[in-house]
C-alpha cells in the first residue's frame, strides 16, 4: 500500500530524473477523460438549486469547495493554465489581448493569432496524449486551433459559438464511443459552454439571465450523462467539470476612462478591462510612471517586476512594463466601449479581478471510475488540474506550477 502511494506521488509530482522515460511516454493504462468547461461559472452558482444534473455528478463524485483561478482571471489565460498546469506568466497566454514584439497583437477573435503556434508555450495535455498514441478530441478549447509543438488534437474545429449545446454534447459522445465516421474512439475529449459567462457580462451574476444560462448548461450536462449512459460509457469515463473564473457585479458607471489613467501621449494601453497593461512611449517612461504607478481611487499600478508575488505574474516578455489592477467591480475602458458604458444604466458583470476575491472563485467537480464518491475537497487552484489529467491518462506530467498533491484526495 505504502509503495503504491509512493508510486502515485512520483507519478503525480512530475519529478524528473535523467533515467525517466520521455514525458510523452505512457506510464500506465490510463482511462477515458472528458474535461468540460462552463465558462464564467462562479462557485456559488452550484448552490442555487438550478443544476440538478451537476448535483448528481457531484453526489456520485467529488467537488472542490472552490477553485482559484490563475492571474489574470480571464478566459484564455485560465483555460490554457488548466490544460498545461502552467501559470500564464509561464505559458505565454498572459492576457486575452496582448502584444509580442515578434508576433504582433493577439486577440480572441483574431484567427491568425489563435492559430499561430508561437503564441502557445508549454505543452497542452492533448499534445502529450497524441504523442503517446492517445486519440484526442477538443470541441473548443483555447489553443486547440494551433499546431502546438507541431501537434493538433486528433479532432478539433474552429471555435463556433453558434454550435448548439446539444450538438456539441452528441458530437463528443459519438467521438468517445468511436461512432464518428472512420474514427477510433478518443480517450481525451473536451467540451466548452460560453453562455453563462456571456450572460454574466451582460446582466450581472445575480441576474435571471445567468440563472437561465446555468440551467441551460446543466441541461447539457444531463444530456451528456444520458448520452454516455446510452453508449454504455458512463462508468468508464472520468468527467471533470471546471470553469475558468467567476463573475463580479459591475454597477452602472463603475468605469474609469483610460485617458484619465495616463496621458495617451505618455503611454499606450496594451490591454484594458480589469488587468490593464501599459507600454510607455519612447522617452516618456518617467512621465508614464509618475501618472500610473501606485494606488489610485479605483485601481493600483505596478511595474511588472513589482507586482504582488502571490499573482506569480510579470516575468513574461508579453506582460507590458506597467500593469494596473482594477478594484472589484470597476473596469478600465476606452473609445466606444467607454461611450457606450456612460449611457448604460443596467447592472453588468466582469471578471479579471484579483483571483483571491470570493467573486472570482470557480468550480471543480468530477465523477468517474477514478474518483471517490460524495467527497468535498478543500479549495484547489486551476494550476492543480493538469497533473490530475496526466495521471488519469497514464501520462507523465510535464514540469508545471501545480501542487501535485492537491487532487490526490479526489481519487479512489
Ligand atoms: P472573456 O470573457 O473576455 O474572458 O472571454 C470569453 C469569450 O471568449 C467568450 O464569450 C467566448 O465566446 C470566447 N471564446 C471562448 N473560447 C474561444 C475560442 N476557443 N476561440 C475564440 N474565442 C473563444
Ligand atoms: Zn471566461
Ligand atoms: Zn468573460
Image (cartoon, rainbow, N blue to C red):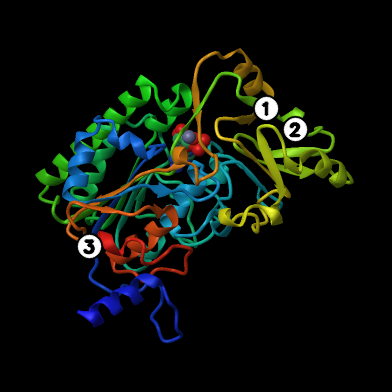
Residue 234 in the image: x percent, y percent? 14, 50
Q: Is residue 121 above or below residue 280?
A: below
Cβ at disc 2 under 8 Å from ligand 1? no
Q: Report whether 7 appears left or right of 301.
A: left
Q: Report whether 263 appears left or right of 211.
A: right
Residue identified by numbered label 2? 261
Image quadrant occupied by the C terminus: bottom left
Residue identified by numbered label 1? 256
Q: Earlier in the sequence, mark 2 or mark 3?
A: 3
Image quadrant occupied by the N terminus: bottom left
Q: Is residue 391 above or below residue 245?
A: below
Q: Is residue 240 visible?
A: no
Among the 4 quarters of the image, the one containing residue 98: top right
Distance from disc 1 to disc 3, alpha carbons, whole Å, reads 49 Å
Q: Report whether 142 appears left or right of 168.
A: right
Residue 313 in the image: x percent, y percent? 60, 54
Distance from disc 2 to disc 1, alpha carbons, whole Å, reads 8 Å
**Mark 1 or mark 3, whichever is nearer to me:** 1
Residue identified by numbered label 3? 31
Q: Earlier in the sequence, mark 1 or mark 3?
A: 3
Amino acid at each position: 500500500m505504502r509503495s503504491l502511494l509512493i508510486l502515485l506521488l512520483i507519478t503525480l509530482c512530475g519529478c524528473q530524473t535523467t533515467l525517466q522515460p520521455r514525458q510523452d511516454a505512457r506510464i500506465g493504462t490510463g482511462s477515458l477523460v472528458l474535461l468540460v468547461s462552463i465558462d464564467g461559472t462562479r462557485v456559488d452558482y452550484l448552490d442555487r438549486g438550478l443544476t440538478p444534473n451537476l448535483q448528481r455528478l457531484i453526489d456520485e463524485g467529488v467537488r472542490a469547495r472552490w477553485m482559484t483561478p490563475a492571474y489574470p482571471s480571464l478566459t484564455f489565460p485560465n483555460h490554457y493554465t488548466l490544460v498545461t498546469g502552467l501559470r500564464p506568466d509561464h505559458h505565454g497566454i498572459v492576457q486575452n489581448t496582448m502584444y509580442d514584439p515578434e508576433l504582433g497583437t493577439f486577440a480572441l477573435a483574431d484567427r491568425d493569432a489563435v492559430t499561430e503556434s508561437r503564441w502557445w508555450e508549454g505543452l497542452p495535455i492533448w499534445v502529450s496524449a497524441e504523442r503517446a498514441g492517445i486519440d484526442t478530441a477538443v470541441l473548443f478549447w483555447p489553443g486547440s486551433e494551433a499546431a502546438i509543438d507541431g501537434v493538433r488534437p486528433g479532432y478539433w474545429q474552429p471555435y463556433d459559438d453558434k454550435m448548439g449545446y446539444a450538438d456539441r454534447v452528441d458530437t463528443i459522445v459519438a467521438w468517445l464511443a468511436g461512432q464518428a465516421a472512420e474514427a477510433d474512439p478518443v480517450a481525451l475529449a473536451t467540451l466548452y459552454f460560453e453562455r453563462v459567462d456571456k450572460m454574466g457580462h451582460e446582466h450581472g451574476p445575480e441576474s435571471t439571465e445567468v440563472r437561465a444560462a446555468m440551467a441551460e448548461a446543466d441541461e447539457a450536462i444531463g444530456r451528456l450523462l444520458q448520452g454516455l449512459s446510452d453508449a454504455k460509457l458512463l462508468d468508464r469515463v472520468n468527467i471533470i467539470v471546471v470553469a475558468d473564473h467567476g463573475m463580479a457585479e459591475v454597477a452602472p458607471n463603475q468605469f474609469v476612462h483610460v485617458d484619465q489613467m495616463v496621458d495617451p501621449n505618455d503611454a499606450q494601453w496594451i490591454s484594458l478591462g480589469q488587468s490593464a497593461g501599459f507600454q510607455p512611449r519612447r522617452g516618456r517612461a518617467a512621465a508614464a510612471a509618475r501618472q500610473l504607478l501606485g494606488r489610485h481611487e479605483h485601481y493600483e499600478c505596478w511595474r511588472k517586476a513589482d507586482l504582488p508575488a502571490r499573482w506569480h505574474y510579470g516575468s513574461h516578455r508579453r506582460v507590458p512594463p506597467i500593469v494596473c489592477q482594477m478594484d472589484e467591480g470597476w473596469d478600465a475602458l476606452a473609445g466606444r466601449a467607454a461611450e457606450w458604458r456612460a449611457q448604460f444604466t443596467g447592472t453588468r458583470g466582469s471578471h479579471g479581478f484579483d483571483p483571491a476575491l470570493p467573486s472570482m472563485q470557480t468550480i471543480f467537480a468530477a465523477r468517474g471510475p477514478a474518483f471517490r464518491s460524495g467527497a468535498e475537497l478543500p479549495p484547489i487552484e486551476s494550476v492543480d488540474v493538469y497533473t490530475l489529467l496526466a495521471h488519469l491518462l497514464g501520462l507523465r506530467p510535464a514540469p508545471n506550477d501545480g501542487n501535485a498533491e492537491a487532487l490526490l484526495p479526489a481519487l479512489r
